[in-house]
Amino acid sequence: MSEIEAIPMSPVPVFLKTHKKLWIPLGAALFLVFVISNIPAIWGAYLLTRGTGLALSGVTGTVWNGSASLASLRQPAQEYSLGQLSWSLSPLSLLTLSPCAQITTKLPMQQFDGEVCSGSGGAVKVRNADVSLPVALLQAKLPVPVQGQFSSHIDELELRGNVLLKLKGKLTWNGARVNTGANWLDLGSYAAELSDNGNNGISAKLFHLAGPVDVDLQVELAAPSGGKVTGGFAAPKAFFESANAIDMLSMFAQEERVDEQGKTHYRVDMNL
């Protein structure tokens, strides 16, 4: 009769058999992991909305990875719809009492994807975020009708309520159009380097990417209101004349010279 070969036993059961007291803490640890990993998403929604002005509805998932069917951002003068929102919460950030989550929101022509942290005293921090939205969403804050699409990459942004604490990033305005009152001016595309000015305001260096108007402007937005625009821009004068924009230009720019390429240069020094 042939011998039956012995099947080696797994070392884990042997170890637990010889250390029976480990069953209880191991079972408790596994149960704790199960409970923590299945914490309802409503707790994640609480962490995201605490002191941020963010409102969520239709919340599903877990505290670590959840979603909301509708999100909105409440501001003192207006409420902005963000559409669907999903998040992935960083467990380690909970140890610092400043929970951080990778957040994505989606609406047609309006998106956000970046890290958002809730800090002490109601502060909100945004890092490494990409934002895209129609210019029309900001129309109420602009003096003339405009069109186009804003896209921005935010390296760092920190707010406490409506007070800007930190800002570093870039903004692009694609398909820029401005209404002169009689016609629409197709301006092209422009970009701006954004930063805080150290006094809760915004400093922006605006320059030309493509289109008929060369721009080199410095914009300073003070807090809580006011500011200044300085610098200049240049384009063929016929471009502005064709859109009946000469009268509008005279309100904020002074004609300086015509260069060898036939472009008229305008100087801007305007208080906001």
Image: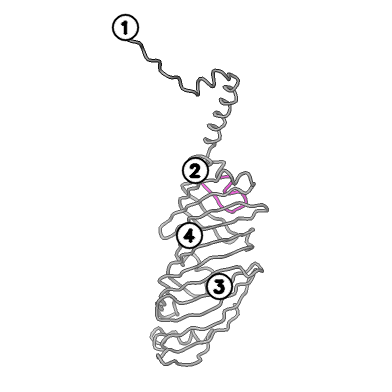
Figure quadrant of residue 252:
bottom right
Q: Where is residue 198 drawn, in percent x and y?
A: 65, 68
Residue at 59% x, 54% y is 53
User: Marks 2/4: CA distance?
Assistant: 20 Å
Going by the numbered disc 2, the residue's amino acid type is Asn
Q: Where is residue 149 drawn, in percent x and y?
A: 43, 67
Figure quadrant of residue 124:
bottom right
Checking the image for residue 65, the label placed there is 2
Query: Farthest left residue?
Result: 1
- CB contact under 8 Å: marks 1 and 3: no
Q: In this orientation, which residue lies closer to the viewer: 121 or 180?
A: 121
For marks 1 and 3, give the one nearer the viewer.
1
Q: Is residue 25 above or below residue 116?
A: above
Going by the numbered disc 4, the residue's amino acid type is Asp
Going by the numbered disc 3, the residue's amino acid type is Ala
Q: In this orientation, which residue lies closer to the viewer: 25 or 118?
A: 25
Going by the numbered disc 1, the residue's amino acid type is Met
Earlier-in-chain disc, 1 versus 3: 1
For marks 2 and 1, give the one nearer the viewer.
1
For mark 1, give the secondary structure: loop
Earlier-in-chain disc, 2 versus 4: 2
Please state the extent of the stretch shown in magenta in the rendering: 45-56
Checking the image for residue 238, the label placed there is none
- CB contact under 8 Å: marks 4 and 3: no
Mark 1 highlights which residue? Answer: 1
